[in-house]
Every structure is written in structure tokens, then in C-alpha cells.
Amino acid sequence: MKEFFIQIEFLLSVGLIITTAIAHRLIIWSATKLSKKVSRSELRKQYVSRYVGYVIWTMCAIALVLVWGFRNEGFWVALGSTFAVVGVALFASWSILSNITASFILYFTFPFKIGDRIRIHDKDLPVTATIQDIKGFYTILITVEDEIITYPNNLLLQKGVSILKPNQESIFDRVLETHEIDKTLVDGPERST
């Protein structure tokens, strides 16, 4: 029994688990500190902590498998097949991965947060709404008409976004009167001299 505790595999496993636990705690602590500094919601901090935890502990599990060195040929074939299927699935739907990455970028760097009223400058479907929640794949927006819109996170990074004051009207939301439109068509745009 004493020989087991001095085996290199056991020592590496214990070191790996302790290092992973410390790294996980350190990242959670950093995310908490950053979320307080940039006024992010508690729910967003939980999302980031959960996703980072999944990644860190999955890497730890893979490292443990490599440390103990499974010698069963069938295991490696099954593992390789699983990674092949997962790889094809990820490449087939790369937008899922880009939305998760965009979620992290939105959490750590972008100036808008939950509760902000924003305007998304999209030529096909411009949106003015309030951010209700930022999830892992999409952001939930609520318009003035109480319409709930789920907007993919990666599109928030690609489109121009204006942060509006609570009662500010976006110039794009202003409805022109018929006589204003007719005057613009007849006279042309006003020119300053």
C-alpha cells in the first residue's frame, strides 16, 4: 500500500487536481473582482465561472487519463471516434462556438450591460431595445412594445451598437411626417453654406 502513494502517477494526479482546483478558484476570484469593477450582474459572473470551470476540469480529466495511461486499445478507439464526431459537430456549427466566445468578450470588454437601452444598427432589421439578459449563446432584448428578441452574441460584436439614455429616442426610430418626406424629395437635402 505504501508503494502506491509514492508512485509517480499518484503524485502527478494529486498535483494536477490541486493545481486545477487552485486555478479554478483563482479564475472565479478574478471574475468576481472584475464583475464588481465593471458593474456586471451576478448572473453573468456565474455563467463565466461555470463555462471556465467546465473547460478547466475537462482539461484536468484528459490530463489524468494521459497520466495513468490507459492501455486498452478499445478505449483509445472509442475516445478517438468520440473526438472525431465532436470535432465534425463543432465545425458544422461553428456559430455555437463563436457565440460562446462572443459571450466572454461581451462580459469582459463591452460597455453595455444588462438594463442598458441600446440601438443595433443593422440595415435589414434595426432594433432599439433594453438588454434583459446576456446568456451564453444569445442576448435577450425587450422592445418598447414588450416584444422579446433573442439576438446572437456574435452579431452584437459585428454590428454597430449605440447605448441610449433611458428616455432618449434614437434618430432611426423617429417617424417622419408625410410633409417632411415630401419636402425632402422635392427640395433635396438641405445644404449648409
Image (cartoon, helix red, strand yellow):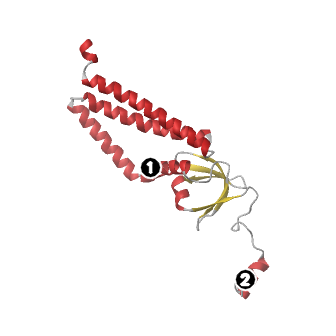
The N terminus lies in quadrant = top left
- Using the rendered view, name the quadrant where residue 163 is placed: bottom right
- Residue type (three-letter) at the residue carrying disc 2: Thr
Check disc 1 and report its element: helix, strand or loop: helix
Q: Give the Cα separation between the discs numbered 2 and 1.
A: 46 Å
Vertically, is 78 above or below 163? Answer: above
- Using the rendered view, name the quadrant where residue 80 is placed: top left
Q: What residue is shown at x 48% (from left), y 32% (from top)?
A: 25
Residue that lies at the very extreme toward the top in this rendered image: 1
Viewer-closest of 5 and 77:
5
Residue with the mark numbered 1: 97
Q: Is residue 30 left or right of residue 23?
A: right
**Pointer 2 and pointer 1: residues touching (CB < 8 Å)?**
no
The C terminus lies in quadrant = bottom right
Q: What residue is shown at x 24% (from left), y 35% (from top)?
A: 76
Vertically, is 4 above or below 93? Answer: above
Work out whether mark 2 precedes mark 1 in sequence or the reverse, and give the earlier one: 1
Residue 91, position in %: x, y? 37, 52
Q: What residue is shown at x 41% (from left), y 36% (from top)?
A: 56
Check disc 2 and report its element: helix, strand or loop: helix
Q: Is residue 135 left or right of residue 66?
A: right
How many numbered dots are placed on residues in this image? 2
Residue 67, position in %: x, y? 27, 30
Residue 23, position in %: x, y? 43, 34
Residue 52, which numbered label?
Answer: none
Answer few, some or many: residues within 10 Å of disc 1's Cα (few below 14, many 20 plus, some between 14 and 19): some
Residue 125, position in %: x, y? 61, 64
Q: Is residue 134 left or right of residue 116?
A: left
- Residue type (three-letter) at the residue carrying disc 1: Leu
Residue 184, which numbered label?
Answer: 2
Viewer-closest of 187 and 15:
15
